[in-house]
Image (cartoon, helix red, strand yellow):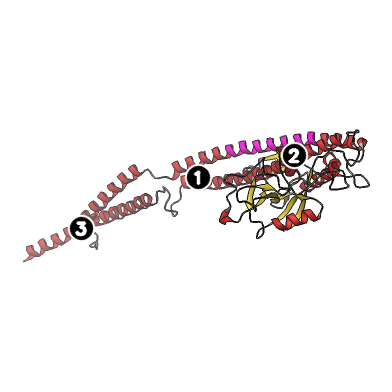
């Protein structure tokens, strides 16, 4: 409405109307957004504090991401160290067997079978033929001890072994014709998907699975030799394969960061540069390398004296490995504790931020209703104030007439 000349009542009513309208819009914006500081054009001390809290929360979240990555790094380390522990344990057994002076070099280890890993792309049928050409056969796992020996030569992959039910579906046998008396199937296996899975695969975990024998290739197979299959003593050949595996662990990496290069790990966990630190693990250190480095002629267990020295080296490596695994475990525990602390800090900041920014719906709704009434009242007052001069003019006109 138009204010007539210098109508003071209309001026006051107009100002009241503008103020009430602004209050209504402000309350409406808060109610619809749920944010106390929905209008960035009017910053306040509380709004500035809320902005700082948001920044702190984001930085704490990044710190938690750092800790999560560090935990994954440590868990990967522990997985490989566990494999190394199995391999070193078996290497110690072989060294002790090689010290038996009552047996010749070729018979040392008795009639014990040995297992080796052959890498390359093979179907099961190709792997079976290749193993026979090498003077052995696909591994036949007939006991828990055989299972442990096969797992010890595996390098974290998935490979073929010598089980099949191609003759009679569901009746699994080893390639030497013996029926299976020991089994280690994965959950739900064998399932013979589409009716064509009649070859045996062993996972990195050691569990078994059935796969097609012809149309599926894996990255290698486990070959089995008996004591009569090679001129190399059984314990020497198996120890050599295990030594190569332990040495290969030193090159493992996580996100292109070496796992076992001996570097010190420092993980920043918050904006104040607080960090966690752990001693590095070096699988190339002398304590470990002495177990997988052969003599000048390429042997590990030639003669009782060398076998005894190798046994002492393996025992030293196992002791060092236990210390290193304890270090990794302590680091993981520290990460878990730090993550809990950051989570607690983040939750507290979020609660504080909520108290600063969240709208009290009941209070703001009351204020909104009050401002609407004030706006309606101001509108009526302005209309009345604008009518009054017109009424006075009409009275003056009547008086003149």
Element type at mark 2? helix
The span from disc 1 to disc 2 (Cα, nearest Å) is 56 Å
Question: Label 3: which residue?
Answer: 383
Furthest residue to the bottom?
Answer: 401
Question: Label 1: which residue?
Answer: 49
First reached walking from the N terminus: tag 1 or tag 2: 1
Question: Label 2: which residue?
Answer: 86
Q: Are marks 2 and 3 in contact (CB under 8 Å)?
A: no
Residue 321 seen in the current view: yes
Q: Main secondary structure of the magenta part?
A: helix
For disc 2, the neighbor class at 10 Å (few under 14, some 14 to 19, many from 20) is some
State the image quarter where residue 390 is shown.
Answer: bottom left
Which is nearer the eye, 61 or 217? 217
Q: Where is residue 9 in the image (x, y as percent from the top left)?
A: 23, 54
Element type at mark 1? helix
Which is nearer the eye, 188 or 309? 188
Q: What stretch is highlighted in magenta?
A: 316-340
Q: Where is residue 22 in the image (x, y as percent from the top left)?
A: 34, 54
């Amino acid at each position: 409405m138009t204010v007539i000349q210098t109508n003071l009542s209309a001026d006051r009513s107009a100002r009241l109307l503008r103020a009430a309208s602004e209050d209504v819009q402000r309350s409406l914006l808060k109610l619809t957004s749920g944010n106390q500081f929905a209008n960035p054009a009017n910053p306040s001390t509380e709004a500035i504090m809320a902005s700082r809290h948001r920044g702190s929360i984001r930085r704490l979240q990044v710190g938690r991401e750092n800790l999560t990555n560090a935990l994954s790094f440590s868990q990967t380390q522990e997985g490989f160290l566990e494999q190394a522990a199995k391999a070193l344990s078996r290497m110690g057994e072989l060294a002790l067997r090689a010290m038996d002076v009552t047996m010749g070099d070729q018979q040392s280890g008795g009639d014990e079978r040995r297992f080796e890993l052959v890498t390359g792309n093979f179907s099961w049928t190709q792997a079976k033929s290749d193993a026979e050409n090498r003077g052995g056969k696909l591994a036949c796992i007939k006991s828990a001890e055989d299972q442990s020996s096969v797992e010890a030569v595996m390098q974290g992959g998935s490979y073929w072994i010598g089980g099949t039910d191609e003759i009679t579906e569901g009746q699994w046998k080893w390639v030497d014709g013996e029926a299976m008396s020991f089994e280690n199937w994965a959950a739900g296996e064998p399932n013979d998907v589409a009716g064509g899975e009649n070859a045996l695969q062993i996972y990195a975990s050691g569990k078994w699975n059935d796969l097609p024998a012809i149309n599926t290739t894996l990255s290698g197979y486990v070959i089995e030799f008996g004591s009569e299959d090679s001129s190399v003593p059984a314990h020497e050949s198996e120890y050599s394969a295990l030594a190569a595996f332990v040495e290969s662990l030193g090159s493992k990496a996580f996100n292109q960061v070496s796992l076992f290069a001996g570097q010190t790990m420092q993980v920043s966990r918050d904006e104040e540069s607080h960090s966690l630190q752990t001693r590095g693990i070096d699988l190339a250190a002398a304590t470990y390398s002495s177990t997988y480095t052969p003599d000048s002629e390429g042997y590990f267990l030639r003669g009782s004296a060398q076998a005894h020295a190798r046994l002492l080296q393996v025992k030293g490596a196992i002791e060092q490995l236990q210390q290193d695994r304890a270090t990794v475990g302590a680091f993981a525990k520290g990460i878990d504790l730090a993550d809990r602390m950051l989570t607690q800090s983040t939750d507290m900041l979020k609660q504080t931020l909520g108290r600063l920014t969240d709208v009290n719906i009941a209070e703001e709704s009351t204020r909104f209703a009050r401002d609407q009434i004030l706006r309606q009242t101001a509108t009526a007052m302005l209309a009345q104030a604008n009518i009054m001069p017109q009424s006075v003019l009409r009275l003056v006109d009547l008086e003149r007439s």
